[in-house]
Image: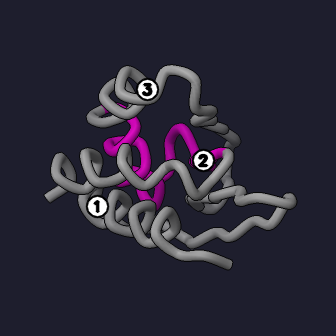
Amino acid sequence: MAASAVRALSSGLKNIREIRVLLCQSSAASKGARDFVEQHYVTLKTSNPDFPIRIRECSGVQARVWARYDFGRESSVSVDNMSADQVAGALQTLVQSKP
């Protein structure tokens, strides 16, 4: 699931300007976000070398994925307590949406 979602993300990145993943380095609630980054960041970045994909770690923060669109509009979704596959699905939803 996550691998196909990551491939689909690469084709949909034309609609957005930046992706940010906020996560805690040690909390159980951020485990899915950490797993997603460990498993899929390299694939996303090598497929889109000029596209900004930011990973932000902060102790105690709620795991969240942000997408920044044209004209500075942003949208986010909480990915606390999600698996890596669910995080990929949430990110895919953000990429496909148009705020």
Say whether residue 20 is magenta: yes
- In the rendered structure, which segment of residues is drawn in magenta? 18-38
From the viewer's perspective, is the residue at label 3 or at label 1 nearer?
3
Q: CA distance from mark 2 to mark 3?
A: 11 Å
Residue at disc 2, secondary structure: strand
Residue at disc 3, secondary structure: helix
Q: Give the class, few, some or many, for how many residues have Cα within 10 Å of label 2's Cα (few <14, many ≥20).
A: many
Q: Is residue 67 above or below residue 75?
A: above
Q: CA distance from mark 2 to mark 1?
A: 18 Å
Q: Residue shown at 56%/71% (left/top)? A: 78
Amino acid type at image mark 3: Lys
Q: Please name the residue that numbered disc 2 is placed on.
A: 19
Q: Please name the residue that numbered disc 1 is placed on.
A: 83
Residue 23 placement (x, y as % from top left): 57, 48
Q: Residue shown at 64%/59% (left/top)? A: 66
From the viewer's perspective, is the residue at label 2 or at label 1 nearer?
2
Q: Residue shown at 63%/58% (left/top)? A: 67
The quadrant of the picture occupied by the C terminus is: bottom right
Residue 91's label in the rendered image is none
- 78 or 60, which lies in front? 78
Residue 91 placement (x, y as % from top left): 44, 61
Q: Is residue 67 above or below residue 98?
A: above
Q: Please name the residue that numbered disc 3 is placed on.
A: 45
Residue 7 placement (x, y as % from top left): 25, 45
Nearest to N terminus: mark 2 or mark 3: 2
- Residue 57 appears left or right of 1: right
Q: Give the class, few, some or many, for how many residues have Cα within 10 Å of label 3's Cα (few <14, many ≥20).
A: some
